[in-house]
Amino acid sequence: MRVRFGALLPSAIAIGFGLLTLIGLLAGGDGSLFDLLTTLFLQIVVITVALAFLLGILNLLLVHLGRLFGRKRGALYSLVLLLSFVLALTLAILERTGGLPARPAGERPLSMILLETVQVSIESALAGLLVFALVYGAYRMLRRRVTWGGLLFLAALLTVLLGEIAARGVFESPLLLSFRTWLSSVPVSAGARGLLLGIALATVIAGVRVLIGQDRSYRE
């Protein structure tokens, strides 16, 4: 079997850096050589991620500039995005350089107020659409075929929605509120923790595959 050193080199580099970082993290910040190397590697990763983020922003701007000047479909949305980007960037730069009047003590910066105002509005709109999507999904599910899983999904959905309405003070139902609280704190929390554990295990498995050279993306 012929060994290609050009294909083995990326795997060897990934294994070496992965082992050094793992040993440094297990050392627990004792100031050893491995700990210093781990800190250096993590700083390099942070810088690399920041550069990748900047390149992603640049690519996004170039795509929307091309769509805007090419008068393609959706050029209006590209114009809104570009204007929002320029406005947010200009506001942040003026705040950092002192180009805006000083804010009173304890008040948030204008850029943060702008971000939270827009973000909260968009998240509220998406949350409202999510409710209709869940109700419509339950309707389609039961229309196609009535199953115990569909009925359980519908019951949980109605319980959460009615409990949320009761929590807003529209009507009083202590039993419904208690059941909604139990449903959110026990089954939902257990399911979320199970998903997080699954993600953690998948991350560990992916890291082990990289360290032992089984990930083909590092060899080809």
Image (spheres, helix red, strand yellow):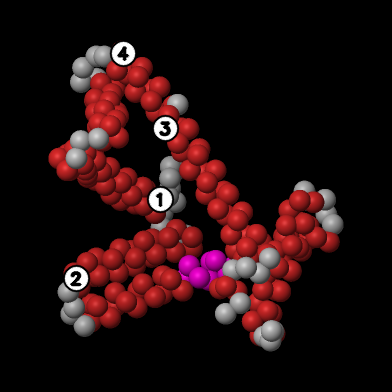
Disc 2 element: loop
Per the model, the C-alpha gap separating discs 1 and 4 is 40 Å
Identify the mark nearer the N-term, 3 or 2. 2
Residue 3 among those drawn in magenta = no
Give how far across and how far down residue 219 sits, in percent. Answer: 61, 77
Identify the mark nearer the N-term, 4 or 2. 2
Decide if residue 135 is in sight here. Answer: no
Per the model, the C-alpha gap separating discs 3 and 2 is 39 Å
Disc 1 element: helix
Task: Please report the bounds of the magenta region as a residue range.
Answer: 47-54
Asked whether the residues under the numbered discs 3 and 1 touch, taking CB atoms below 8 Å apart as contact, a structural biologist would say no
Identify the mark nearer the N-term, 3 or 1. 1
- Magenta-colored segment: predominant secondary structure: helix
Residue 220: numbered disc = none
Disc 1 residue crowd, few under 14, some 14–19, many 20+, Cα 10 Å: few
Q: Nearer the viewer, mark 1 or mark 4?
A: 4
- Identify the residue under disc 2: 74
- Identify the residue under disc 3: 188
